[in-house]
Image: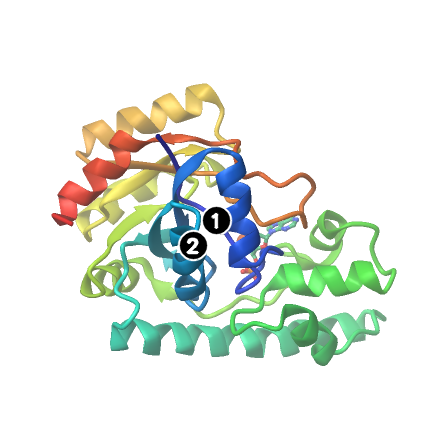
Amino acid sequence: MYADLHLHTHYSDGTYTPEELAERGREHGIKVMALTDHDTIDGCKQMAIACVERDIEFIPGCEFTVELDGFELHLLGYFLDLQCAKLIAQLEKYQAVRQNRIHEMVSRLNELGVKITSDDVLDIASCNSPGRPHIGRVMVAKGYCRSLDESFQKYLKKGKPAWVPKDKMSASQAIRLIHEAGGLAVIAHPGLYHRDDVISPLVTVGLDGIECFYTRHSTPMTEHYLMLAEQHALLVTGGSDCHGDNKGRPLIGGVKLPYSYVEQMKSALSV
Ligand code: AMP
Ligand code: FE
Ligand code: FE
Ligand code: ZN
């Protein structure tokens, strides 16, 4: 039995509907799926139903953009109580930040001669949690860039001319929030940061796990993070980070987390 605990839908910057995602999971023989859209749990109810219909176990989750001493990283929350009022309120706050940032980034682009509107972006996003990939998609659709990657490399990446920083939760705030919502807090794709020094401070403020298995982790990297997880007595998770087909081939099926790790997550929560 295998799990994929890092997945996106069109409720953030993925392209699949929950049903399409669950169906892809079924085709790949995945038995447990967690939905981890960016700063939103809006897709979880629909995904839960899509999974039940396909005999897949579903874990409600979310990928939080957070900050630790000025460094931006992603934390995954798992087994979240979707009714948690504080969680809902905090997510709404950061979704508003995302929406405002779209307007700011579009103004920057306009100054650079890229004639797109915020409405173009918000229409294509048509979700509460829009992000840079939605801007990139409009730029590709309107012929300003050949690919999503080019839009990031030329305009949207940190330090590029249309990039605007966004207000973020602190890592400790996010971990507290995840715990208040009954969940587990996991550092997402640590291999992408080259900042293993953030792990200890995160453990101090309650981090529960490390995403050791990940599409862009090499085998030595995975082994390295498995060792760190053991050293810090942390849970081990893994997922593909599939965003649908907007970044080349869909990634689902490429990472298969053995079910025993899911059992360990559940025993940590006694669910
Ligand atoms: P945002 O949430 O607005 O800060 O945008 C970050 C998201 O953009 C990440 O979660 C990725 O899904 C996506 N992303 C980052 N770099 C690239 C890239 N080079 N090409 C396409 N998508 C990217
Ligand atoms: Fe994303
Ligand atoms: Fe991420
Ligand atoms: Zn992700």
Q: Is residue 70 visible?
A: no
Residue drawn at the location 83% of the way across and 69% of the way down:
114
Mark 1 to mark 2: distance in Å?
Answer: 5 Å
- SS type, badge 2: loop
Where is mark 2, residue-wise?
A: 36
Amino acid type indicated by mark 2: Thr
Name the residue: 36% across, 51% down. 76
Q: Quadrant of the N terminus?
A: top left
Report whether residue 134 is seen. Answer: yes
Q: Is residue 175 above or below residue 105?
A: above
Q: Amino acid at mark 1?
A: Leu
Image coords of residue 225 (percent x, y): 34, 29
Query: From the viewer's perspective, is 12 left or right of 138?
Result: left
Eyeballing the image, is 224 above or below 157? Answer: above
* Residue 192 x/y as whole percent: 49, 39
Is label 1 within 8 A of ligand 4 (CB to nearest ligand atom)? Answer: yes
Where is residue 199 shown, x and y percent of the image?
29, 41
> Relative to residue 25, is residue 173 drawn left or right?
left
Mark 1 or mark 2, earlier in chain = 1
Task: Say how many tags the image has.
Answer: 2
User: Badges 1 and 2: C-beta atoms under 8 Å apart?
Assistant: yes
Picture quarter containing residue 17?
bottom right
Label 1: how many residues lie within 10 Å, few (<14), some (14-19) or many (20+)?
many
Residue placed most toward the observer, 253 or 85: 253
From the Cβ of disc 2, is ligand 4 less than 8 Å away?
yes
Q: Which residue is mark 1?
A: 7
Which label was assigned to residue 118? none
Task: Return the x and y of residue 117 as percentages of the image width and height.
Answer: 76, 78
